[in-house]
Image (cartoon, helix red, strand yellow):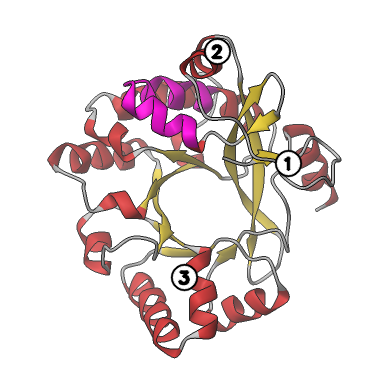
Amino acid sequence: MMIVPDKGSDAAPRRAPPANASLLEAAIERGGLHPFFHAKVSMMTRKIVGVEALARIATPQMGFASPAAYVELAERNQRIDALTYVMTRAVAKHVAGFDGLPCSINISPMSLERLDFADNMAAAINEAGLECSQFTLEVTESRAIEFGQHAFETMTALRTKGFSLAVDDFGAGVSNIDRLRNYPFTEVKIDPAFTRLAMDEAFAKAALVSCVRLAREHGLKVVAEGVETQEMWDFMTWLKVDEAQGFLLSKPMQPGDFKELLKRG
């Protein structure tokens, strides 16, 4: 689990201590969860056209920690839904000041097995005076193959309420494009490791080109993650993806910094 540098810091990320239940509960019950915002940029205009909300947990000694390990702990302890709702409410309060900018929020595939998940997510968004149509929920592709009937029903309910649905880290798992056809996804986010491999290997390049083409044929938006170099940007321009994220364009920022970035255009 990696630490995000504090505001204005250029220090390299440090490794965080293992997740523990007390910090998890503090994040859920006492406001220890903090959203950072990562810009999504149009490949056509290079302007900010959306943002992804990334959760950070405040730790006593190590600053802001990525909650990856905490998500696994929350899943094991049956607290993932509570964690997601707290994060969604915190994000929505800030997004209300982003002038209608579309926002993505990461969710666990486990939450899709709960038939009340769509209602609870909609309530969390509506509390901030926002519409569900402003939000995309991102689900990790490597877990998507485990979806069952409850997940399909929940995803359909989310779409009915106006949410968009994205396959996150596409290419990191083993599912194929037919999975995208069989579930109500609206967006594909290409895993950066898939991109790097495609830039070096002809077979991987052909596979990625095919995935992008098929995604488009199914009417899905295509977003490139982890664009860190001009070479990667040029490759994604050649692929004709819709949007990109990565350190070449912007780093994840605290809410105030991101609002300033929006003001600068």
Amino acid carrying mark 1 in the image? Met
Q: Quadrant of residue 171?
A: bottom left
User: In the image, which is nearer the foreground, mark 1 or mark 3?
Assistant: 3
Q: Which residue is painted at 77% across and 39% down in the image?
A: 259
Residue 36 x %, y %: 66, 37
Mark 1 to mark 3 CA distance (whole Å):
25 Å
Q: Furthest-left residue in view?
A: 149
Element at label 2:
helix
Mark 2 to mark 3 CA distance (whole Å):
36 Å
For residue 167, above or below residue 203: above
For residue 195, above or below residue 51: below
Q: Which residue is painted at 65% across and 74% down in the image?
A: 233
Q: Quadrant of residue 94?
A: top right
Residue 252 x %, y %: 69, 45
Amino acid carrying mark 3 in the image? Phe
Q: Which residue is mark 3?
A: 194
Mark 3: few/some/many CA within 10 Å (<14, 14-19, 20+): some
The circle drawn on residue 56 is none
Amino acid carrying mark 2 in the image? Ala
For residue 51, above or below residue 47: above
Residue 247 x %, y %: 71, 58
Residue 74 visible to the viewer: yes
Q: Which residues are magenta?
A: 69-89
Mark 1 to mark 2 CA distance (whole Å):
22 Å
Mark toward the start of the polypeptide (2 vs 3): 2
Q: Kindly check if marks 2 and 3 are in contact, taking CB atoms under 8 A apart as contact.
A: no
Q: Which residue is mark 2?
A: 26
Q: Say whether residue 33 is left or right of residue 80.
A: right
The circle drawn on residue 253 is 1
